Image (tube, helix red, strand yellow):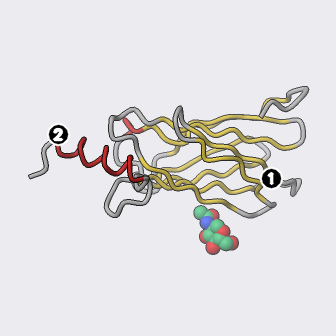
Amino acid sequence: MITMIHKVLLAAVLLAAGYYDTAEGWDTVTIHVTNKLSTRRILIVHCKSDDDDLGGSAIDAGANITLVFGQNVFGGTLFWCSAAYEDKRLSFKAYEQNDHNTFVKVFDVSDDGVGGIDVYSGNLLHISRWRIISHLNF
Ligand SMILES: *[C@@H]1O[C@H](CO)[C@@H](O)[C@H](O)[C@H]1NC(C)=O
């Protein structure tokens, strides 16, 4: 049986070795984001947590991206994504560790905003609508 202290020690070793995100059997989260804008504009998406910036992606019309990231072993991982096209912007919560067993999520970004589904539970996720802004501060 692996005790909590062993898990913490293992995590520390993995973190130090830079293997945290890719360690076999370690909990990772996968999210998919699809550009379903009817205007066929390129969608910019940028996801990050407090200590893990996944960088920005440009998603072509109809295309999707897949982001995979590790959970914080100490708990409390929270990932937010920003999305932008033209003068519109929104943000949505992509993942919160305390949701439990929500390791694959699919988000569709459309003219209305973003909606998502948790693949395992089938639950619909947080919806955000577009806001119009005067300049991008991405
Ligand atoms: C992402 O795009 C690929 C290629 O078109 C497709 O096969 C895949 O099903 C898409 N995934 C999602 C989650 O929409």
Closest to the observer: 108 or 134?
134
The structure residue drawn at horizontal position 87% and vertical position 57%, both measured from the top left corner, is 40
| Residue 97 x, y percent position in the rendering | 40, 39
| Residue 52 x, y percent position in the rendering | 54, 41
The structure residue drawn at horizontal position 89% and vertical position 36%, both measured from the top left corner, is 87
Which dot marks residue 37?
1
The structure residue drawn at horizontal position 80% and vertical position 53%, both measured from the top left corner, is 37
Which dot marks residue 5?
2
Q: Quadrant of residue 72?
A: top left
- Does residue 1 lie above or below 129 as drawn? below
**Left or right of residue 92: residue 113:** right
| Residue 89 x, y percent position in the rendering | 78, 35
Label 2, label 1: how many angstroms apart (C-alpha)?
47 Å
Q: Looking at the picture, which amino acid does disc 2 mark?
A: Ile
Q: Are marks 2 and 1 in contact (CB under 8 Å)?
A: no
Which secondary structure lies at badge 2?
Answer: helix
- Does residue 82 lie above or below 63 as drawn? above
Q: Of marks 2 and 1, which one's residue comes earlier in the chain?
A: 2
Q: Looking at the picture, which amino acid does disc 1 mark?
A: Leu
